[in-house]
Image (cartoon, rainbow, N blue to C red):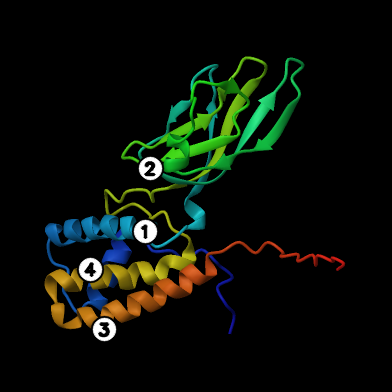
C-alpha cells in the first residue's frame, strides 16, 4: 500500500486543544473551555523557557553601539543571551568579529571605572523584565562597533484557536500531553498524576533530541617531566 508521501503533519491550536481534552477525559463544550485551554498553553510555554534552551527560540539580535554608551536595552521577550560577539568595522569598511566575555553582576559591579572607552571586551546581561546589556569598556570612536548576540526568546503567544503554535514537530506530543495535564488539574484531577508522567516523558524525549550535532574534537596535551 502506498504512503501519502507527505511530511507536513502539524496540530493547529484548535486541534491541540481538542486532542488535550480527549486525553484528559473531558468534553470540550463552550467557548470558555477553549479560552482556558489557550491560557494554559501560554503558561506551559512560559514554563518551557525555564526548562532549558529551546533551540528553535534562538534568534540573532544586532545592536549598533554608540560612542561612550555602555548600556543597551533588549526586548522583554529576550530571555537570555547564549553567545555574543563585537563586530568591529574600520574606516575602510573592513570588519572583524571578535569575542566578548560574559561576566556576572558582581564582576561588573567591581569594575572600578565603568566610563573607560575602548573596544568592548566584556558584557553583563542584566535579566530584568526589560533586560539590559552592559558593555565594558564603553565603545570608543576609533571604529564602528556592533553587538551581535544569539538570544533565547519567548515562544510566540497563543491568542486564537485558528493559529499554529510556534514549535517544531518533535514537540507536538509533549504539547498535547502537557496541555492535557494542565486541563486535568483544573477539570479532572483524578487523571492529573498519570498525565503528568506522560507529559514529563514526552518532554524529556523532545528536549533530549533538541540539541546541536556539532562534532567534538579532543586534542591530547603532551608534556614532559
Tell whether label 3 touches label 4 (CB within 8 Å).
no
CA gap between label 3 and label 2 equals 35 Å
Q: Which one is in front in this view, the residue at disc 3 or the one at disc 2?
A: 2
Q: Earlier in the sequence, mark 1 or mark 3?
A: 1
Residue 84 picture quarter: top right
Tell whether label 4 touches label 2 (CB within 8 Å).
no
Which mark is on residue 127? 2
Q: Nearer the viewer, residue 122 or 57?
A: 122
Q: Judge the density around disc 4: few (<14), some (14-19), many (≥20) Cα neighbours within 10 Å.
A: many
Mark 4 lies on a secondary structure that is helix
Q: Judge the density around disc 1: few (<14), some (14-19), many (≥20) Cα neighbours within 10 Å.
A: few
Mark 2 lies on a secondary structure that is loop
Q: Judge the density around disc 3: few (<14), some (14-19), many (≥20) Cα neighbours within 10 Å.
A: few
Answer above or below: position of 118 versus 53: above
Mark 1 lies on a secondary structure that is helix
Which mark is on residue 50? 1
Residue 22 picture quarter: bottom left
Tell whether label 2 touches label 3 (CB within 8 Å).
no
Indicate the quadrant containing the N terminus: top left, top right, bottom left or bottom right.
bottom right
Mark 3 lies on a secondary structure that is helix
Disc 3 designates what residue?
194
Q: Earlier in the sequence, mark 1 or mark 2?
A: 1
Q: Residue 10 appears at what percent x and percent y?
A: 43, 64
Q: Earlier in the sequence, mark 2 or mark 4?
A: 2
CA gap between label 4 and label 3 equals 12 Å
Disc 4 designates what residue?
182
Answer above or below: position of 194 versus 217: below
Residue at 20% over, 82% down: 191
Instruction: Tell me: 60 left or right of 95.
Output: left
Amino acid at each position: 500500500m502506498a504512503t501519502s508521501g507527505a511530511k507536513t503533519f502539524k496540530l493547529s491550536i484548535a486541534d491541540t486543544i481538542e486532542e488535550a481534552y480527549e486525553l484528559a477525559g473531558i468534553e470540550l463544550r463552550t467557548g470558555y473551555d477553549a479560552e482556558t485551554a489557550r491560557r494554559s498553553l501560554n503558561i506551559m510555554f512560559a514554563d518551557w523557557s525555564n526548562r532549558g534552551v529551546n533551540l528553535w527560540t534562538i534568534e540573532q539580535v544586532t545592536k549598533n553601539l554608540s560612542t561612550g554608551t555602555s548600556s543597551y536595552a533588549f526586548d522583554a521577550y529576550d530571555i537570555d543571551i547564549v553567545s555574543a560577539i563585537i563586530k568591529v568595522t574600520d574606516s575602510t569598511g573592513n570588519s572583524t568579529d571578535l569575542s566578548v566575555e560574559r561576566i556576572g553582576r558582581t564582576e561588573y559591579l567591581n569594575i572600578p571605572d565603568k566610563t573607560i572607552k575602548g573596544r568592548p571586551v566584556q558584557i553583563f546581561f542584566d535579566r530584568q523584565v526589560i533586560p539590559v546589556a552592559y558593555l565594558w569598556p564603553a565603545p570608543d570612536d576609533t571604529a564602528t562597533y556592533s553587538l551581535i548576540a544569539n538570544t533565547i526568546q519567548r515562544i510566540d503567544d497563543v491568542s486564537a484557536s485558528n493559529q499554529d503554535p510556534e514549535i517544531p514537530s518533535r514537540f507536538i506530543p509533549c504539547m498535547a500531553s502537557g496541555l492535557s495535564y494542565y486541563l486535568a488539574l483544573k477539570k479532572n484531577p483524578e487523571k492529573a498524576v498519570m498525565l503528568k508522567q506522560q507529559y514529563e516523558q514526552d518532554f524529556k524525549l523532545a528536549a533530549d533530541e533538541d540539541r546541536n550535532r556539532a562534532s567534538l574534537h579532543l586534542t591530547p596535551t603532551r608534556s614532559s617531566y
